[in-house]
Image (spheres, rainbow, N blue to C red):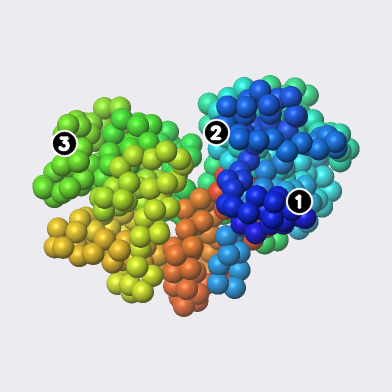
Amino acid sequence: MLPYTALHHLLLAELAEPIVLTGGNVSDEPIAYEDDDALIRLGGIADAFLTHDRAIHQRTDDSVIRPLPGAITMLRRARGHAPEPLALRRPVPRPVLACGAELKSTFCLAQGRRAFVSQHLGDLENHDTLRTFVEGIDHYCGLFGIHPEVVAHDLHPGYLSTRHALEITGVEHVGVQHHHAHIAACLADNGDPGPVIGVAFDGLGHGTDGTLWGGEFLRADLAGYERLGHLAQIPMPGGAAAVRQPWRMTAAYLRDDHPGLDVARRNAGRWADAVHLAATGLDSPLTSSAGLLFDAVSALLGIRDKITYEGQAAIELEQRADPAETGAYPAALTTTSGPLIVEAGDLVRAAADDLTAGTDPGVIAGRFHNGVAAAITRTCVALRQATGLTAVALSGAVFQNALLLDRTVQRLRAAGFRVLKHVRVPPNDGGLSLGQAAIAAAQDHT
């Protein structure tokens, strides 16, 4: 990072050596912004404390932005951006509170033609973060004089944000499907009413069919959506364990098709069990997750078998990919009476074939990224023929991947599509509350 205050310059000049500068909090806990609390919670971690005679009244993380060719992607919207209001295309009929999701939590208050998306709050996985979430809502309501009459929330019943939303009385509650909210956030970010072909690629989200969605193609506007296609569903051996241990997804995709792979040898004591779970469906919920597809290839290439933070395997796979590689693995599209199915397993098997043949992992990673971009484009072309839609909105945490985003946008534009992507709010769950608010407002109009 670059020093962005005079204080940083003074500190670095005094120390004359590198320092570790990070948020003042223990992992998964909110920032400690009061001196006494910081001394207690961080005393065993920090080497020194720099205090000030001006009290901090509102905790706010640093914003994180990723530069792209000719554009940026907002990864975390916080200091310097929140609570700057976002202009809405149409006025909100009644004041709305949208409670967002569980991870990368934000909330959104909307009134008139303005939406106020909170700063990044973190993951709602403990009481302290939930308390910060609730206090933040009260602070924004008082700051902007907004008294919500409609409260929007994710459909996942286990999210603490959903539980809090449903505990609010005297309001109308609106449940919003996770991936519809992603596409709506992209539409609201661009001031576009839709309809569009929405490509929502992320980790996991609660689907309306009882499975876990994450690789979705939707016909969507702000008022509603239809699921037109998705990545082929795959079992998650061990459920949540497959998120923490990406090799399990490799086992689910390959089963026993490629004996002798290093990923199987590295996990020899558990590989057969994971294959058995995937084959039988025991403790293996079905998912169409694009994020877990990237995880499977990361483990296959020996990059990451176990993660210590969300998205680690996919991030390191992107870093390993050869950007000069132009080849692309093919993925079949299958049609039934229902949604169009993208056979994502074809990509994993092609990567395994190349790995067995001795191809460099960087080349394989490049061909995989290109293959995903090609599959997205081919699917959108097929859906254009069915719907007549010529605009595509890209959302979800997978599109934080700069290589994938660039290759996908290039291919879609070459195919004649108008492409919408995120600029003002993150494509990850940090932008979800804006999408929920936009959907609740649009449905209120109808």
Which residue is nearer to you in this view: 335 or 72?
A: 72
Location of residue 60 (image quadrant): top right
- Residue at the disc numbered 3: 268
Q: Which callout, 2 or 1, points to the residue nearer the camera? A: 1
Quarter of the N terminus within the rendering: bottom right
Secondary structure at numbered mark 3: helix
- Residue at the disc numbered 1: 7
From this view, report whether residue 424 is shown above or below residue 76.
Answer: below
**First in sequence: mark 2 or mark 1?**
1
Q: Amino acid at mark 1?
A: Leu
Secondary structure at numbered mark 1: helix
Residue 233 placement, left or right of 97:
left
Q: Amino acid at mark 2?
A: Ser
From this view, report whether residue 9 is shown above or below residue 69.
Answer: above
Give coordinates of residue 205: x percent, y percent.
Answer: 48, 40
> Disc 3 to disc 1, how far (Cα)?
53 Å
Q: For the point 75% across and 29% down, which residue is it?
A: 35
Q: Residue furthest left?
A: 259
Disc assigned to residue 27 = 2
Q: Residues within 10 Å of mark 1 (few under 14, many from 20)?
A: few
Give coordinates of residue 327: x percent, y percent.
Answer: 29, 72
**First in sequence: mark 3 or mark 2?**
2
Q: Residues within 10 Å of mark 2 (few under 14, many from 20)?
A: few
> Disc 3 to disc 2, how far (Cα)?
32 Å
Q: For the point 61% across and 35% down, which residue is it?
A: 47
Q: Amino acid at mark 3?
A: Ala
Q: Residue furthest right?
A: 145
Give coordinates of residue 371: x percent, y percent.
Answer: 33, 64
From this view, report whether residue 42 is shown above or below residue 1.
Answer: above
